[in-house]
Amino acid sequence: MRQRFLLLHNPVAGMRRHRLVRRVVHELKRRGAEVVMLRLWNLGGNLSRDALARIVHFDGYDAVVAVGGDGTVRALAKAVGADASVPIGVIPAGTGNVLARELPLPSTPIAVAQMLLDGPETEIPGAMAGNEPFFLMTGVGFDGEVIAALDLELKRRIGKAAYVWPILKATFRKPRTFEVNVDGEVHTASWLVVAKASRYAGSFLITRGASVRKAELFAVLFQATSRFGRLLEMIALGLGLHHRLPGVKVLSCRVVSVSEPGHAVQIDGDEDGETPVTVELGGGNLRMIVPARGNGSDAA
């Protein structure tokens, strides 16, 4: 049973479930665990492997726990590195929690604490967008524009509602098309999502073939050229019907690249500059604590 935990909390991750975090910490301590929590603003931008090593010597802890959402998990996984001596746990306290929904991870304090204490470990295959590792998705175009316009302080205070204005701005901006090279074949899109997960932006199902547990990628190409077309794509995605639109393609793939510069990029829900970018499998695995089989039914 794990007894010593380092919790890294990203306050920018959102306002959700502060009570969950407090109760998980209380439950861990009640069961005799030692818990150290560090709050780091802009975890993805400020946390490096060297910085984390200076904060604490890993060998003294049984697990390092990400307290936040998908971006927090990615930032911690990047800092820990593929050769980490300790696993990563998650208290799903972010806005979308796609990874928590995919596995699934529990969301009640007792179940989360139990998972962290004695849950098994699993390897989550990674992928790379340029030099950046990710475990869920990379987006180019529309969702990259949304994330680039997001006010992180507002997100911290009001959660999902902070996305409303950036989404409206991006939706009613005329789509810009670009070429996408998928395993050597050139396609045209105005929005690209390279998915390693079946879910997107929380609970929306973007592709039925993907799984975070598999070393597979799917390119989802949205080809709208008008504001109305983009709005139709958004509605269809919300209903899980986007794959039926004639202007949407879902392709199994290994390498996807966008060479044209100037298109916004997001990785696992965090801003990552602009194209050009190449997305492919690799970059190491995420060694992660998951619930014992049959104990993840109260998923986030």
Image: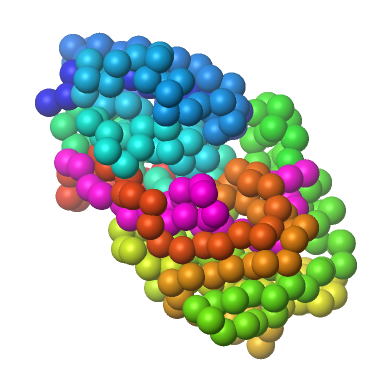
Comparing 50 with 270, the one in front is 50
Report whether residue 241 is seen.
no
Identify whether 80 is placed above or below 294.
above
Color encoding of the figure: rainbow
* Residue 222 % position (x, y): 67, 74
Q: Quadrant of the rendered structure where residue 60 is?
A: top left
Looking at this view, name the residue that lies furthest to the bottom.
246
Nearer to me, 188 or 3: 188
- Most extreme residue toward the left, as rendered? 1
What residue is shown at x 74% (from left), y 73% (from top)?
A: 178
Q: Is residue 255 above or below residue 276?
A: below
Total label count? 0
The image shows residue 10 at horizontal and vertical percentages of 53, 26
Where residue 294 appears, as percent x and y from the top left, is: 19, 50
The N terminus - image quarter: top left
Say if the magenta span includes residue 163: no
Please determine whether, in this image, residue 117 is positioned above or below residue 283: above
Residue 9 seen in render: yes
Please give the range of residues in magenta.
120-149
Q: Quadrant of the C terminus?
A: top left
Above or below residue 271? Residue 263 is below
Q: Quadrant of residue 62?
A: top left
In-image side of 284 versus 248 (left or right): left
Q: Is residue 70 left or right of residue 102?
A: right
Whether the magenta-drawn stretch holds residue 121 is answered as yes
* Residue 235 picture quarter: bottom right
Q: Position of residue 220 (x, y in %)?
A: 57, 72
Q: Is residue 28 left or right of residue 9?
A: left
Q: Which residue sits at x=47%, y=50%?
A: 134
The residue sitting at 52% across, 40% down in the picture is 71
Residue at point 22% right, 20% down? 59
